[in-house]
Image: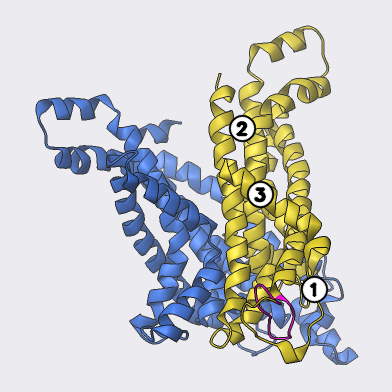
Chain colours: A blue, B yellow
Amino acid sequence: MLAYVIRRLLLLVPVLVGVSVVSFALLQLVPGDPALILAGEEATEEVLTRIRQEYGLNRPLPVQFLAYLRHAVVGDLGVSIQSRQPVSTLLKQRFPFTLKLAFLAILVSAILGVVAGIIAATNRNSPLDIAALLGSLVGISLPIFWLGLLAILIFSVRLHWLPSGGSGSPAHLVMPALVLGAASSAVIARTTRASMLEVLRQDYVRTARAKGVSDRLVVYRHALGNAMIPILTVFGLEFGYNLGGAVLTETVFSLPGVGRLIVEGIFARDYPVVQGALLIVATTFVLVNLLTDVAYAYFDPRIRYS
Amino acid sequence: MSGGVIVGLFVLLAVLAPLLAPYEPLRGRVVDRLQGPSTEHWLGTDELGRDVLSRVLYGARISLQIQVAAVGLALLVGTALGVTAGYIGQWPDMVIMRLVDIMMAFPGIFLALAIIAALGTGLANVIVASAIFLVPQFARVVRGSVLTLKEMEFVTAARALGERDVTIVARYLLPNSLAPIIVQTTLRMATVLLTASGLSFLGLGVQPPSPEWGAMLSNARSYMITAPHVATVPGLAIMLVVLGFNLLGDGLRDSLDPRLRE
């Protein structure tokens, strides 16, 4: 087990390095002089020289990159051009919110998806099954931002049940979590159904049934446990997609998360913010995938030796 | 194969938009603004008095352009990478797979956002961003297919006959990989539409006054209370087209896959 974890951790390193390269390279790829971009259009020569000194923009690129890495590792991600606040402060304010949202969304979609998947699998080819399949197809085809707008239209504007934006109370998170989780529930439902169908065909299930075990016990005790294993991987992946989808959801519902931070940063050409947010989000995603893989290996020992 | 029907309809409408659209998509009379569906304007008008139906039709053109360009680009680059990684193996494989991992380390739309941040907004950059976003998936699929196929007997036979690697790839590996590639292409068309319209919705993609569906939805936000039809129609269009491609892709996968497994 430990060997597997170490192997996976080692594979992580080049990916994390790559991610930081991409984040670092962002500023360099933008057409124009980085110093001018950081300082603003009306900056004088003195300011430009000072910026070049501070950020070390005169040094060769690899040296700059190493400096960037060194700072990043201790949590110094630069200063926002717009607000003059340290990027890490901004991220500390906004990122936990997005994590909370993504987590809620995954929770909702896990419950909905698994239940729907089990119902579909145990009632194969019945109207319930077909409804579930169609529903999940529609679910993955829905644009998140449209679903969000529709939800606001129906639940805020017409019915006045829920607030249409902002944060502050649990009610504010209901629609965003549901909207964000919609596509994920569809994916989880499909995976659960496929996995359950696969497991229910197995010999040990047939044996259990032959022994006279009730259908319910067969599903919940014997089948579900083994079926969950591939579904776990999907949870991890979907959490990642939810991080991405959070960008759109936060924009529609005006939520104070890192998604909106990065969009605002792009509009304002506030590159330190964009770089920092990219770095943090990608690193989190990579770590989540690692955890999922490790959990998968824990539950399914066959994986450890591949 | 209802997916095929939807996709076919979409392509047809997109290509024929200039002939079918009753009005100019970019010109509107402000006095007509925000009207609901009527006999003159089948889907109503938007906040500047432009005919929604015409804008949706022209939007289909834009979406199709983006999809074809982005998927085409990703297909070329991804296949090249996948074949190199799968067929040659060793160092190129490791390097390419790490590159793929790095690209996939950015969840969802973030990679496209990063590229837009560096290159700026606009139709061309949306295509580039979407293409880069898709490359890892094509690379993986092609690599997987090549890895399986290169162990097969006809490849060994070809090598024994002295055929050059390039020939083997072109004549045997690629044609036999066609099935998963086609499935991926179809499904990714759906992904591109969602990504590109998402970017435009955020204001970071195709810019107004272009009638791109995502951008139309973004404009419609302010008018949701007074004129909900402006917000409903483009989103419905996106959903239906994505659904069409997903159905088509699933159908293709079901019909092509068993034959591939032989």
Q: Residue furthest left?
A: A212
Which of B30 and B39 lies nearest the eye of the viewer?
B39
Asked if residue B222 lies in the magenta stretch, the reply is: no
Give coordinates of residue A42: x percent, y percent. 86, 92
Q: Residue furthest right?
A: A45
* Mark 1 secondary-structure assignment: loop
Q: Can you tell which of label 3 and label 2 is closer to the viewer?
A: 3
Residue receiving disc 3: B7
Q: Which of the 4 image quadrants contains residue A221?
A: top left
| x 45%, y 57%: residue | A184
Badge 2: chain ID:
B
| x 65%, y 83%: residue | A79
Give, as a single range, the part of the protein colored magenta: B40-51
In the displayed structure, does residue A243 sit left or right of residue B112? Answer: left
Residue receiving disc 1: B23
Residue receiving disc 2: B144
